[in-house]
Image (tube, grey):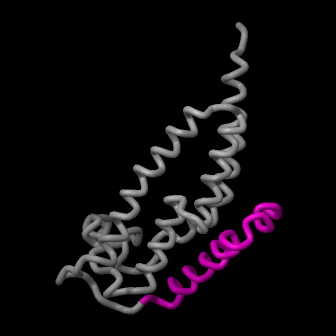
Amino acid sequence: MAQNPRGLELAAVADSARLDSRRGHRITGLAEPSEPGVPGRRGADDERQDRLDALKGLYGRRPFAAIMIAIAMLSLAGLPPLPGFVAKFLIFRNVLDAGHVGLAVAGLVASYLGLYFYLRVIQYMFMNEAEASAARGTPRRYAALASVLCLVPALLLMFFPGWLLDRL
């Protein structure tokens, strides 16, 4: 049974792109919601917390949490100069170098379509009024510290991508 050289080439590109993507998303993914009252926290009201409505007006209740989630969402969307852009750029560069222009175009179209969903979450946090039943409170010290610790590597990747990626 002869193997398809194009298939092997595509597998090599996918493997290389996956490694490049993991570097960027490993750092960006750390910034997922960790604030109380934000989906992601486990408790008695998980069902309600996991709904998009739980983020309505988050900026008014917890501005730091809303800003951190927005930065993470924009990075995952792949907008420059955030770290997610570096990951997507490396993926698409590898795909184009392998000569798979059609796959690169399909990936770019999918990225732009996905941007709508990321911006929708940001719109809920910043442009909607908070529900009357939404919990109001101050961020806990450990959650704020964890967010800042996640922000530092993301900023390093944003401003010094070559330096940081060479050391990973």
Q: Quadrant of residue 33?
A: bottom left
Q: Is residue 97 part of the magenta span, yes or no?
A: no
Q: Please report the residue visible at 54 percent of the width from the left and 65 percent of the height from the top.
A: 75
Q: Please report the residue visible at 28 percent of the width from the left and 64 percent of the height from the top.
A: 51
* Residue found at the very far left of the displayed protein: 132
Task: Judge from the rendering whether residue 128 lies leftward or rightward of residue 90; answer left or right.
Answer: left
Task: Judge from the rendering whether residue 26 lies leftward or rightward of residue 108; answer left or right.
Answer: right
Is 100 placed above or below 127 here?
Answer: above
Q: Quadrant of residue 93?
A: top right
The answer to which of 157 and 58 lies nearer the viewer is 157
Q: Is residue 155 part of the magenta span, yes or no?
A: yes
Secondary structure, magenta segment, majority class: helix
Q: Please report the residue visible at 71 percent of the width from the left and 15 percent of the height from the top.
A: 3
Q: Quadrant of the N terminus?
A: top right
Report x, y in % for residue 158.
Answer: 66, 70
* Residue found at the very far top of the displayed protein: 1
Q: Please report the residue visible at 42 percent of the width from the left and 57 percent of the height from the top.
A: 115
Which residues fall within the magenta stretch?
Answer: 139-168
Mark count = 0
Q: Quadrant of the C terminus?
A: bottom right
Task: Judge from the rendering whether residue 120 lies leftward or rightward of residue 35; answer left or right.
Answer: left
Is 58 placed above or below 73 here?
Answer: below
Is 14 placed above or below 75 here?
Answer: above
Q: Is residue 44 visible?
A: no
The answer to which of 40 and 4 lies nearer the viewer is 4
Report x, y in % for residue 166.
Answer: 82, 61
Report x, y in % for residue 60.
Answer: 31, 87
